[in-house]
Image (cartoon, rainbow, N blue to C red):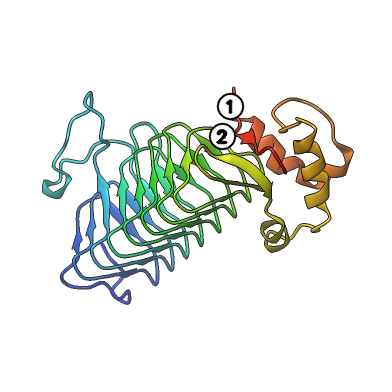
């Protein structure tokens, strides 16, 4: 049941199995299929489509609009913004998740089982393949494409139109075709509340070939220990290659 105080357009379709928090906005023509949790203060634009079944040939393409609820659901975090025409599919084994205060801009696509962290931006036209994990404070530029099962660590920035075929380490800037690590997202460090001096330590590590995938100890990066632990927690990583000049 929707909160009567929430500005939900009467032309939106909100199916069964939907939990809607306080102050949620849902625009005209949006389609929300269950199971789905929309946390407090989320904003969903006109024509957004959330909760269709995973695009996997071995799974049923259920008709959730008739009450046939299957799969692992979608979760839209508190204060998240889903803009017009965005598409977010059900998870197959875990909730497809948009983190708190993150923005998914118009025509962006999040496939099944994608985890998008908090305070991140997925720009217009971006496509993210299934099973990807995207950290907090990430910025993915317009029309970038992220290959399935890729990891983009906290604070990374991906340039417009970049085909992300390998994993992106913490606070790295990646762009080009083929994509290369071309610097450190110092602005992202600052916005995440870290000293900008950490940019120099990260750049030194990356230039030296330490992309933080192993248990190496870099004392200068102690403040990023939680971020580095998150990055390493995803198993065997295949980081992007460094640009010739970084």
Image quarter of the C terminus: top right
Say the numbered circle drawn on residue 130.
Answer: none
Q: Which of these two is toward me, 76 or 182?
A: 182
For marks 2 and 1, the one nearer the N-term is 2
Q: What residue do we see at 33% from left, 33% from top? A: 92
Label tally: 2
| Residue under pointer 1 | 238
CB within 8 Å, label 2 to label 1:
yes
The residue tagged 2 is 167
Label 1 neighbour load within 10 Å: few <14, some 14-19, many 20+: some
Q: Quadrant of residue 238?
A: top right
Residue at left offset 31%, top offset 42%:
90
Q: On the rendered structure, is 213 left or right of 29?
A: right
> Residue 188 or 35: which is nearer the viewer?
188
> Label 1's element?
loop
Quarter of the image for residue 193 reads bottom right
Residue 133 at what x, y percent from top left?
50, 39
Residue 133 position (above or below residue 116)? above
Q: Secondary structure at mark 2?
A: loop
């Amino acid at each position: 049941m929707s909160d009567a105080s929430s500005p939900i357009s009467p032309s939106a379709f909100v199916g069964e199995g939907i939990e809607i928090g306080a102050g949620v906005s849902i625009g005209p023509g949006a389609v929300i299929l269950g199971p789905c949790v929309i946390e407090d203060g989320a904003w969903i634009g006109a024509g957004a489509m959330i909760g269709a079944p995973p695009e996997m040939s071995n799974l049923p393409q259920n008709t959730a609009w008739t009450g046939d609820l299957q799969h692992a659901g979608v979760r839209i975090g508190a204060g998240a913004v889903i803009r017009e025409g965005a598409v977010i599919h059900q998870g197959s084994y875990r909730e497809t998740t948009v983190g708190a205060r993150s923005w998914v801009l118009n025509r962006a696509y999040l496939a099944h089982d994608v985890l998008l962290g908090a305070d991140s931006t997925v720009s217009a036209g971006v496509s993210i393949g299934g099973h990807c994990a995207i950290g907090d404070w990430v910025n993915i530029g317009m029309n970038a494409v992220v290959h399935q099962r890729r990891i983009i660590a906290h604070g990374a920035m991906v340039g417009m139109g970049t085909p992300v075929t390998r994993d992106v380490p913490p606070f790295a800037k990646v762009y080009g075709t083929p994509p290369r690590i071309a610097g450190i997202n110092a602005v992202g460090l600052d916005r995440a509340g870290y000293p900008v001096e950490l940019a120099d330590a990260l750049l030194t590590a990356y230039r030296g070939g330490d992309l933080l995938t192993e248990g190496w100890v870099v004392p200068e990066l102690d403040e990023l220990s939680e971020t580095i632990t998150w990055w390493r927690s995803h198993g065997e990583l295949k980081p992007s290659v460094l640009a010739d000049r970084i």
